[in-house]
């Protein structure tokens, strides 16, 4: 299990790309979990998003959201290295 948890909603457009393979290959400290629902009341239908250690990350496209996820992961890793 990783020290950074990325949660995806099964209904989100983020599932159109292989977020799990991309992030877990690049960051061994990351676990990507896809849940049936993240209880964000339809947010997954509005725009791509994910949750990184409890913090929501958004993008206008899945690709933009993925780049923001990578940035947030880098921030989280920096916190753990202190």
Image (spheres, rainbow, N blue to C red):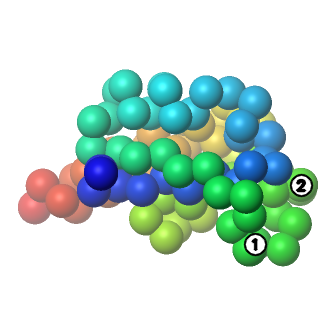
Res 75 visible: no
Label 1, residues with CA under 10 Å away: few <14, some 14-19, many ≥20: few
Q: Residue at x 52, y 67 (%)?
A: 55
- Report if the CB atoms under discs 2 and 1 are less than 8 Å apart: no
Q: Is 37 positioned to the left or the right of 51 in the image?
A: right
Please tell me in which quadrant of the rendered image residue 41 appears: bottom right
Q: Residue at x 27, y 56 (%)?
A: 3
Relative to residue 47, is residue 18 depicted above or below?
A: above
Q: Can you give x and y, in whole percent of width and height, for residue 74 in the image?
A: 33, 45
Q: Secondary structure at mark 2?
A: helix
Q: Which mark is residue 40?
A: 1
Q: Is 82 positioned to the left or the right of 68 in the image?
A: left
Q: Residue at x 49, y 26 (%)?
A: 21
Q: Secondary structure at mark 1?
A: loop
Q: Can you give x and y, in whole percent of width and height, for residue 6 in the image?
A: 49, 52
Q: Which residue is mark 2?
A: 45
Q: Can you give x and y, in whole percent of width and height, for residue 50 in the image?
A: 62, 54
């Amino acid at each position: 299990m990783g020290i950074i948890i990325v949660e995806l909603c099964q209904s989100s457009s983020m599932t159109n790309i292989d977020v799990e393979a991309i992030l877990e290959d690049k960051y061994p400290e990351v676990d990507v979990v896809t849940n049936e629902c993240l209880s964000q009341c339809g947010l997954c239908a509005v725009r791509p998003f994910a949750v990184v250690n409890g913090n929501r990350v958004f993008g206008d496209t899945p690709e933009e959201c993925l780049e923001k996820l990578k940035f947030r992961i880098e921030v989280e890793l920096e916190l753990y290295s202190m």
